[in-house]
Image (cartoon, helix red, strand yellow):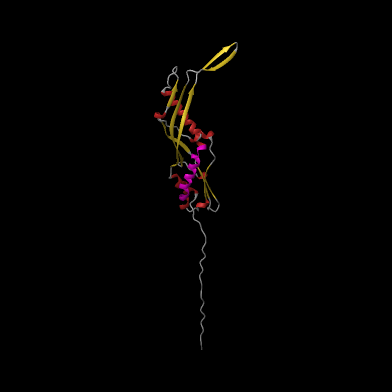
Amino acid sequence: MVLGGACTKQTTTTVAVDSVVVADSADIVLRVRQTSRLYTAEYQVHKIITHSDIKHLRTTVLGHEYDTQLSLGDRKVAIPIDVTLQAYIDFSHFHESQIERSPDGRYLHIILPDPKVVVVSSKVDHESTKQFTDLLRSDYSDEELADFTAQGVRSILRQVPELGILNTARDNAAAILIPMFSALGYDEEAIVITFRKEFTEKDLPFYVEKMKIEN
């Protein structure tokens, strides 16, 4: 009597499932806040401030007013200044409302806090400052020169949106933050970083800090 046995071969197949483990919004907020104040751009601006003070003679003849520029008594000044601006982003109050994630958690949009621009220094080149003063006039006073300098700095600040420092601040912030978010599980190509709006001169009081002037 011959007994026969059957041998059954079993094969186990493992299927790889594509899974992405990424940090949630709370983890992102915690990580970003650790950066605190992030300085992302520095610009140095050279400007020559000019001012002209010309005497006028105003008279009234037979009911008609006349304004005559006098050939004597005028004075002019040219003041070179060097202004250093820095832009930074303060993440101390960064919130989850500034984070947008796709439903599958793969795509990440970070809305940066509004940037700040600070005048680090404003230095007057006294040696190159030139004054022309008529014999009938006195030189500009130190107070007047300081006021002209302050006006020149303010004129530079009004040009901040055109200088490009805000865009540079955003781009440099992205260069720092994107690798951070990539380490948290997000693909670099799926990360978008923006400001909440384009800033103009009307926003000047909100993103410019008190200036510092050195005479």
Q: Position of residue 128 (x, y in %)?
A: 41, 29
Q: Position of residue 73 (x, y in %)?
A: 47, 18
Q: Nearer the viewer, residue 37 or 52?
A: 52
Q: Position of residue 203 (x, y in %)?
A: 52, 35
Residue 47 can be seen, yes or no: yes
- The chief SS type of the magenta part is helix
Q: Please report the residue visible at 50 percent of the width from the left and 38 percent of the height from the top.
A: 163
Considering only vertical position in the picture, is 39 above or below 4?
above
The residue most toward the right is 63
| The magenta stretch spans residue 52 | no
Considering only vertical position in the picture, is 50 above or below 5?
above
Query: Which quarter of the figure has residue 35?
Result: top left
Region in magenta: 162-180
Q: Position of residue 54 (x, y in %)?
A: 50, 20
Q: Please state if 36 lies on the left or on the right of 98 as rendered.
A: left
Q: Please report the residue visible at 44 percent of the width from the left and 23 percent of the height from the top.
A: 132
